[in-house]
Image (spheres, grey):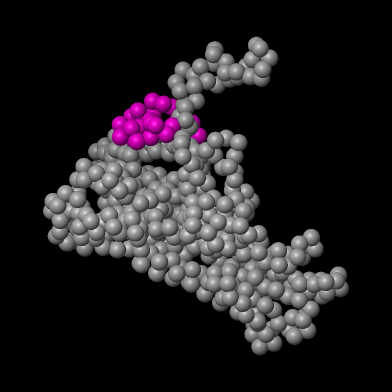
């Protein structure tokens, strides 16, 4: 199955694209720039979605749904927001087709032009805040903590499966608060929820930080983010949480009667992660043999493969396999028994290795006789024999899956640490960027002009100003002007 898979070291981009397709995660659709997420890929997204949804509800949020279409005038109400998204919007101008008089299919009916064009949502702040105006009258209506699972469209010219597509799936939280302090606390809380999910479920270490003025979300006062390091030394923004101040509340006149009876504008936040997390999961852990999935997000945590020559042997193995499956199911472990007789065991081994199944059990007639099973780990490709008379197999499997989860995270953590370097001058910065890549911690004078010059010269951007940044006097690597602390630069997806 993985035969001919390009090597990461030779062509990382080709390796990624081929792996996404061969592991049956997604494929390009007939619509340019869009993708079809296949069942195996969608099952991983479903596990991500389920866990994030649980975390959101645990922090007091409820799900709702808002329209796909946004009146054009809504986007015009918040100046920086419309400027940030104007070039990415898909626009609906007509509401009807009609038969082509020439008999060649259908054409847009020129008589069916909309009075006001509709925007296919690139994000939902405007339509949601127009709705909140009707929902919020008093401080008693606050906080309003809403999340939406939806699709959005951002008209991308250069696309890559999961990482950047014209349409993608995501969740977007939109909350309203009585005070500035509460809104900022919410913004930070949700960034930390994303970080916890990334590290504890995706096994992917992240840097928590704040975006620079140039990199923040259009319409936000501050954007908090989590940044992850991919195996090719490029960074990936894995999630963002925005403190909106009162920008959207003022744009849509969302006011509430305060405790003193005076009308005030509410304070807002928005936050989101998308199917880009699928790309992060692939690039953070996978190898030249295929996917490496952390057990907490693997659709199949354990696969049992019978090794047999006759129907009698298969029947005996099947009986033992179902016994194991019942035991694993009882402790919440997802397991599959692949007894297809149309593929040889070796082919199946390669298939599940490509698909990143964390643990593989092989059972043959000799194993039944000796009361053993062969257990193979996907993360380090090691094999061991488990004696069923000496060890409790479900306990052994549960412990091994936990160890795989920790091992994958630790490997990624060490890699991220090794790919984080300090640069004290421009020459050192450029050399590190070209020869090593990764995160580069360096001084910056705080101006957008210098930030843009660095980006133009090197294609590196400020990924974030780390929340744990140490105040440290220094000189900007490019301008030489005073700097109060280091920020993280990297080339990024």
**How far across and how far down the image is residue 245, in percent?**
28, 43
Please tell me which residue is depicted at 62% across the width and 80% down the height of the picture. Answer: 384
- Asked if residue 81 is among those painted magenta in the image, a careful observer would answer yes
| Residue 98 appears in the rendering | yes
Residue 340 percent across, percent down from the top left: 77, 62
- Above or below, 279 relative to 328: above
Residue at (54%, 39%) from the top-left corner?
A: 34
Q: Is residue 101 above or below residue 162?
A: above
Vertical placement of residue 439 versus 127, above or below: below
Q: Residue furthest bottom?
A: 390
Work out whether 66 lies above or below 76: below
Q: Nearer the viewer, residue 366 or 70?
A: 366
Residue in front for this viewpoint, 130 or 68: 68
Task: Identify the magenta region.
Answer: 63-89
Q: Is residue 224 visible?
A: no
Q: How far from the left and from the top, in percent, is residue 381?
A: 58, 72
Image quarter in which the N terminus is found: bottom right
Residue plotted at (53% across, 59% down) = 7
Residue at position x 55%, y 66% from top? 295
On the image, which quarter does residue 259 sit in?
top left
Can you give x and y, in whole percent of width and height, for residue 472 in the image?
17, 61
Queried whether the magenta region covers residue 301, the answer comes back as no
Total marks in image: 0
366 or 58, which lies in front? Answer: 366
Query: 145 or 493: which is nearer to us?
Result: 493
């Amino acid at each position: 199955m993985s035969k001919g898979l390009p090597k990461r070291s030779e062509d990382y981009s080709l390796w990624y694209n081929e792996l996404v397709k061969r592991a049956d995660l997604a494929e390009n659709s007939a619509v340019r720039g869009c993708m079809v997420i296949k069942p195996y890929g969608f099952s991983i997204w479903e596990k991500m979605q389920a866990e994030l949804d649980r975390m959101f509800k645990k922090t007091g949020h409820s799900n709702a749904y808002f329209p796909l279409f946004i009146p054009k005038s809504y986007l015009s109400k918040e100046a920086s927001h419309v400027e940030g998204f104007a070039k990415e919007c898909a626009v609906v101008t007509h509401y009807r087709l009609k038969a082509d008089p020439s008999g060649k299919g259908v054409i847009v009916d020129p008589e069916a032009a909309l009075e006001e064009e509709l925007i296919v949502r690139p994000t939902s702040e405007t339509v949601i805040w127009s709705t909140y105006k009707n929902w919020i009258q008093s401080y008693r209506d606050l906080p309003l903590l809403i999340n939406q699972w939806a699709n959005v469209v951002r008209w991308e010219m250069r696309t890559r499966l999961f990482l950047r597509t014209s349409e993608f799936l995501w969740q977007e939280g939109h909350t309203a608060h009585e005070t500035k302090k509460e809104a900022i606390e919410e913004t930070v809380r949700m960034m930390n929820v994303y970080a916890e999910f990334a590290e504890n479920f995706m096994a992917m270490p992240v840097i928590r930080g704040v975006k620079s003025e140039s990199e923040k979300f259009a319409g936000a006062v501050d954007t908090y983010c989590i940044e992850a390091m991919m195996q090719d030394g490029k960074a990936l923004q894995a999630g963002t949480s925005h403190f909106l101040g009162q920008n959207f509340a003022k744009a849509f006149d969302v006011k509430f009667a305060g405790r003193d009876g005076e009308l005030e504008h509410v304070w807002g936040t928005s936050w989101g992660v998308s199917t880009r997390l699928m790309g992060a999961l692939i690039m953070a852990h996978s190898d030249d043999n295929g996917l490496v999935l952390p057990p907490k997000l693997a659709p199949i945590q354990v696969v049992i493969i019978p090794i047999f020559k006759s129907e009698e042997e298969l029947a005996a193995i099947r009986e033992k396999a179902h016994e194991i499956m019942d035991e694993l199911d009882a402790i919440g472990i997802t397991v599959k028994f692949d007894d297809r007789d149309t593929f040889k065991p070796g082919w199946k081994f390669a298939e599940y290795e490509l698909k990143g199944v964390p643990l593989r059990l092989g059972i043959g007639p000799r194993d039944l006789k000796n009361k053993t099973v062969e257990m193979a780990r996907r993360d380090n490709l090691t094999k061991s024999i488990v004696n069923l008379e000496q060890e409790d197999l479900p306990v052994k499997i549960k412990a091994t899956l936990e160890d795989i989860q920790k091992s994958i995270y630790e490997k990624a953590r060490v890699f991220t640490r090794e790919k984080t370097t300090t640069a004290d001058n421009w020459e050192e910065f450029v050399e590190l960027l070209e020869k090593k890549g990764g995160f580069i911690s360096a001084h910056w004078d705080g101006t957008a002009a210098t930030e843009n010059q660095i980006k133009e010269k090197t294609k590196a951007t400020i990924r974030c100003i780390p929340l744990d940044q140490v105040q440290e006097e220094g000189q900007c690597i490019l301008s030489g002007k005073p700097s109060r602390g280091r920020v993280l630069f990297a080339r990024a997806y």
